[in-house]
Image (spheres, rainbow, N blue to C red):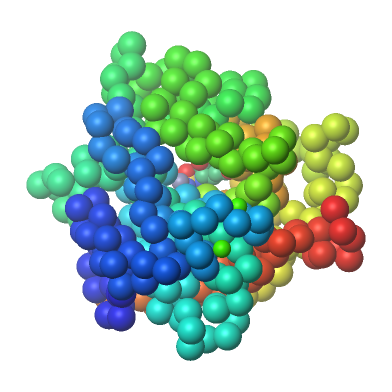
Amino acid sequence: GPLKSATSYHTYAEMRQEVDSVVAAHPQIASKFVAGKSYEGRDIVGVKISDNVATDENEPEMLVIANIHARERLTAEQALDYLGQLTNGYGTNSRITNLVNENEIYLMPMVNPDGQVYDMTSDTQPGRMWRKNRQPNPTSVGTDLNRNFNYKWGCCGGSSSNGASETYRGTSAESAPEVKVIENFVRSRVVGGKQQIKVFLDIHSVAELVLWPFGYTMSDTVPGSMSADEEAVHRTIGRELAATNGFTPEQDSDLYITDGTSDDWTWGDQHIVSFTFELGGGDFYPPPSAIDGQVQRSREALLRLTDYADCPYRAIGKES
Ligand SMILES: NS(=O)(=O)N[C@@H](CCC(=O)O)C(=O)O
Ligand SMILES: [Ca+2]
Ligand SMILES: [Ca+2]
Ligand SMILES: [Zn+2]
């Protein structure tokens, strides 16, 4: 397992090697899966972490995705650090042992592998400042995966129809293969008519924020899709998480209006309590020496969120 702290950013290949080595070292609690393929045919790699990992047990499920925006490099490191915390702490740290025994955690460290490889393999250092995937479109290259999800897609001026734009929404919802892979994975976790995933996190950078839906509207509550209680659950947990890493807690739309984002879909369509982190580090490419310090800031927030997986409504003293 990654006993050493990250001292440089993982390439896509190094991420896969790290996942393989963690799974090899902890086969009882970690298993690798491939959720699907990117536009250019790269595996979108996932790891399941739980006791009796080969069995789909009736335990609360959690999904964490990272690096959907290619240049947001620290996010994959945060995901791999979380993997390391859960596996290295198992059997020695009682809190972590309980979290792994009581939940099924799915982690996808690089959900935009084509963009990640393109951003990292360039002679312009430290990176190409690339955000989107690498799918050609009518006028340019790249769909902003975080504007392509299938909830209120393109509804509200929170994305662009211009293929050259950094926030190009795609030709239709789920037109990006990577988004379809993520959505299909989540839809596959509806078992017996019930969505097994109870909490979702999409890790971004760089603004030091803890965000929650909705992004498509400024309204805090929306009849039929965000009740006062449901808003209170998100706000209460969001504030609690932000208190642990010093980030600013706010609704997605307090930042700016966005439509077609991951967490609007996971909450709006799948009713999974959902958050987006914007990590710190000053810019998209903090110096490698800063990685460990930056990822340590949100360790507690990730464990705290995991702890809510069994009953997020506990945050407001209700069952659900
Ligand atoms: N990571 S970022 O692109 O700077 N901010 C995210 C915010 C996501 C959201 O508002 O849900 C985005 O615009 O997709
Ligand atoms: Ca289990
Ligand atoms: Ca299960
Ligand atoms: Zn982002």
In this view, the residue in front, 164 or 108, is: 108
Position of the N terminus by quadrant: bottom left
Residue plotted at (50% across, 28% down): 148
Vertical side of 179 occupied by 211: above or below: below
In this view, the residue in front, 196 or 107, is: 196
Residue plotted at (44% across, 20% down): 175
Is 77 placed left or right of 210 in the picture? left
The single residue placed furthest to the left in the displayed view is 123
State the image quarter where residue 95 is shown.
bottom right
Count the numbered circles shown. 0
* Residue 90 appearing in the image: yes
Q: Position of residue 214 (x, y in %)?
A: 70, 40
Q: Position of residue 96 (x, y in %)?
A: 55, 78
The single residue placed furthest to the top in the displayed view is 138
State the image quarter where residue 290 is shown.
bottom left
In this view, the residue in front, 199 or 59, is: 59
In this view, the residue in front, 206 or 223, is: 223
* Residue 257 appearing in the image: no
Residue plotted at (63% across, 27% down): 151
State the image quarter where residue 31 is shown.
bottom left
Is 223 placed left or right of 184 in the picture? right
Q: Position of residue 82 (x, y in %)?
A: 45, 68
Vertical side of 70 occupied by 299: above or below: below
Is 227 placed left or right of 18 in the picture? right
Residue plotted at (44% across, 33% down): 181
Q: Position of residue 59 (x, y in %)?
A: 65, 59
